[in-house]
Image (cartoon, grey):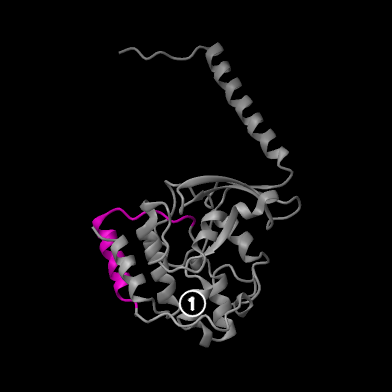
């Protein structure tokens, strides 16, 4: 078979199209008014989100689904090891008992004391095509986010900040009722700012969750529910938190074969 080659005129046409595309992309970046993190290792899309089983410290972007029988078996094993306890009273709970939002000084957790607050750390970690405020490599002003809870993409801009909220996978009030009320201030601050316990998601979805455990609330995106159970279990295991019997039962159910 003869292979056709491009003529000189054809090669020039292809090159012209490529240059034009590059110029358009460059103009888009300039219009943002700030620097860009691009779509490098911090990019999180449905196809590239990390499995929680290979992301035990939460420092990889996204929350990928668990689909294989082996992964689901490992997930159930992790959940099954959790201690069960009844949920205590909410008496005395205040958000400030876990430190102010979003502090950069909670020692002993990933990304602490890097000069950027926890919220912006999370936006940078999970966002794609991240744009920063002019002169800053910290303050995120726009990005594209794949929200694992809904399975939808969000084109986020700081002007409408509430469209993306940072979810505590294990809610702070839940943790308080399960034993955090007796923790040191330092340990509570760690839980509140640990990337393992944090995911940027749809603001309305996060508001609907409130301080629910898995028995009362699960992500609308069914494909991610086993992964959500695993992440909840990873946080509970790391901080020595028990879960309620209904929560544990629901978590195991999500990872059934």
Task: Judge whether 173 appears above or below 125 on screen.
Answer: below
Closer-to-camera residue (1/126): 126
Label 1 Cα neighbours within 10 Å, binned few <14 / some 14-19 / many ≥20: many
Taking the spot 49% from the left edge, 82% from the top edge, the residue there is 89
Screen quadrant of the C terminus: bottom left
Task: Judge whether 22 appears above or below 251 on screen.
Answer: above
Closer-to-camera residue (249/125): 249
Tell me the SS state at disc 1.
helix
Residue 155 picture quarter: top right
Closer-to-camera residue (116/155): 155
Task: Judge whether 39 appears above or below 108 on screen.
Answer: above
Taking the spot 47% from the left edge, 55% from the top edge, the residue there is 62
| Percent x, y of residue 91 | 55, 83
Left or right: 231 in relation to 184: left
Left or right: 103 in relation to 110: right
Task: Judge whether 61 appears above or below 35 on screen.
Answer: below
Taking the spot 37% from the left edge, 65% from the top edge, the residue there is 230
Screen quadrant of the N terminus: top left
| Percent x, y of residue 250 | 33, 66
Q: Is residue 130 visible?
A: no
Q: Is residue 68 visible?
A: yes
The furthest residue to the right: 135
| Percent x, y of residue 249 | 30, 69
| Percent x, y of residue 102 | 64, 68
Residue on which the image places disc 1: 175
Q: Is residue 182 magenta?
A: no
Q: Is residue 65 magenta?
A: yes
Taking the spot 48% from the left edge, 77% from the top edge, the residue there is 175
The residue segment tinted magenta is 61-82
Left or right: 132 in relation to 231: right
């Amino acid at each position: 078979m003869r292979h056709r080659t491009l003529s000189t005129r054809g090669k020039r046409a292809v090159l012209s199209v490529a240059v034009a595309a590059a110029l358009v992309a460059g103009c888009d970046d300039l219009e943002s008014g700030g620097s860009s993190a691009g779509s490098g290792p911090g990019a999180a899309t449905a196809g590239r989100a990390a499995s929680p089983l290979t992301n035990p410290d939460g420092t990889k972007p996204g929350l990928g689904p668990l689909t294989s029988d082996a992964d689901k078996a490992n997930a159930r094993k992790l959940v099954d090891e959790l201690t069960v306890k009844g949920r205590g009273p909410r008496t005395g709970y205040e958000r400030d008992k876990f430190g102010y939002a979003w502090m950069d000084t909670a020692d002993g957790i990933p990304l602490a004391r890097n000069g950027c607050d926890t919220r912006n750390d999370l936006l940078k970690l999970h966002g794609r095509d991240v744009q920063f405020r002019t002169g800053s490599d910290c303050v995120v002003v726009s990005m594209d986010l794949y929200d694992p809870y809904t399975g939808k993409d969000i084109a986020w801009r700081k002007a409408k900040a509430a469209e993306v909220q940072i979810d505590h996978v294990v809610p702070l009030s839940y943790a308080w009722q399960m034993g955090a009320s007796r923790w040191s201030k330092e340990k509570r601050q760690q839980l509140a700012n640990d990337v393992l316990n944090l995911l940027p998601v749809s603001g309305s979805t996060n508001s609907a969750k409130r301080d629910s455990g898995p028995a009362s609330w699960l992500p609308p995106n069914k494909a991610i529910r086993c992964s959500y159970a695993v992440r909840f279990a990873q946080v509970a295991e790391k901080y020595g938190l028990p879960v309620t019997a209904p929560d544990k039962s629901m978590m195991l159910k999500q990872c059934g074969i």
